[in-house]
Amino acid sequence: MFLTRIGYGIIYFLDLIYEIIKSTVDVVFNKIMRRDINPVVIDVETVLKRPVSQTILANSISLTPGTLSVDLDSENQIIKVAAISPRSKEDIIPFEKYIKKMLE
C-alpha cells in the first residue's frame, strides 16, 4: 500500500513536469503567433475530499503556465481557476487522479 502511494507520487511528479513543459510551449507559441488571449475564470469541481489534496492540486494548477488558482472552496470541492484561454477540466487538472491515489 505504501509503495503504491510512492509510485503514484512519482507518476504525479513526472506528469506535472510534462504538463509544465507542454503549457510553457503552448503559451510561448501563442505569444509568438500573436493569437488573441481570451482570459476566463472558471469553477473546476474536484473529486478530492481532503484539504491537503485540494491544496496540492490548486498549487499544481498555479505552477502550470497559463493557469492560476484564484480560490479554493474545500467544503464544496471547487477550485476557481483563471486561464489565459478557455480550456476543458481535463486540460486544467490532468493530474487529479494521481493525487487522489497518492493521498486519499
Image (cartoon, rainbow, N blue to C red):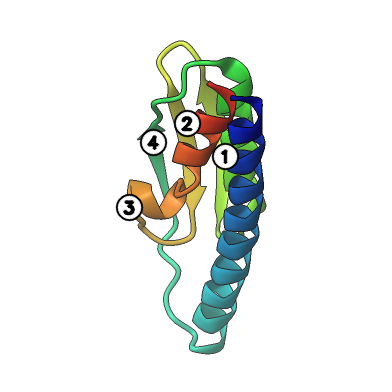
User: Is label 4 in contact with label 2 (beta carbons under 8 Å)?
Assistant: yes
Give the alpha-carbon distance from disc 1 to disc 4, as whole Å.
10 Å
**First in sequence: mark 4 vs mark 3:** 4
Three-letter residue code for mark 4: Val
Q: Which mark is residue 17?
A: none
Q: Which mark is residue 69?
A: 1
Q: Which mark is residue 44?
A: 4
Three-letter residue code for mark 3: Ser
- Residue 58 x, y percent position in the rendering: 58, 36
Mark 4 is surrounded, within 10 Å at the Cα level, by few (under 14), some (14 to 19) or many (20 or more) other residues, namely some
**First in sequence: mark 2 vs mark 3:** 2
- Residue 26 x, y percent position in the rendering: 52, 74
Is 100 drawn above or below residue 90 in the view shown? above
Say which quarter of the image contains residue 21. bottom right
Q: Which mark is residue 79?
A: 2
Disc 2 is placed on an element classified as strand
Give the alpha-carbon distance from disc 4 to disc 2, as whole Å.
5 Å
Mark 1 is surrounded, within 10 Å at the Cα level, by few (under 14), some (14 to 19) or many (20 or more) other residues, namely many
User: Is label 2 in contact with label 3 (beta carbons under 8 Å)?
Assistant: no
Three-letter residue code for mark 1: Ser
Disc 1 is placed on an element classified as strand
Three-letter residue code for mark 2: Ile
Query: Is 101 on the left-hand or right-hand side of 20?
Result: left
**First in sequence: mark 2 vs mark 1:** 1
User: Is label 2 in contact with label 1 (beta carbons under 8 Å)?
Assistant: yes
Is 87 drawn above or below residue 7 in the view shown? below
Say which quarter of the image contains residue 22. bottom right
Q: Which mark is residue 88?
A: 3
Give the alpha-carbon distance from disc 4 to disc 3, as whole Å.
9 Å
Q: State the residue in front, 46 or 84.
A: 46
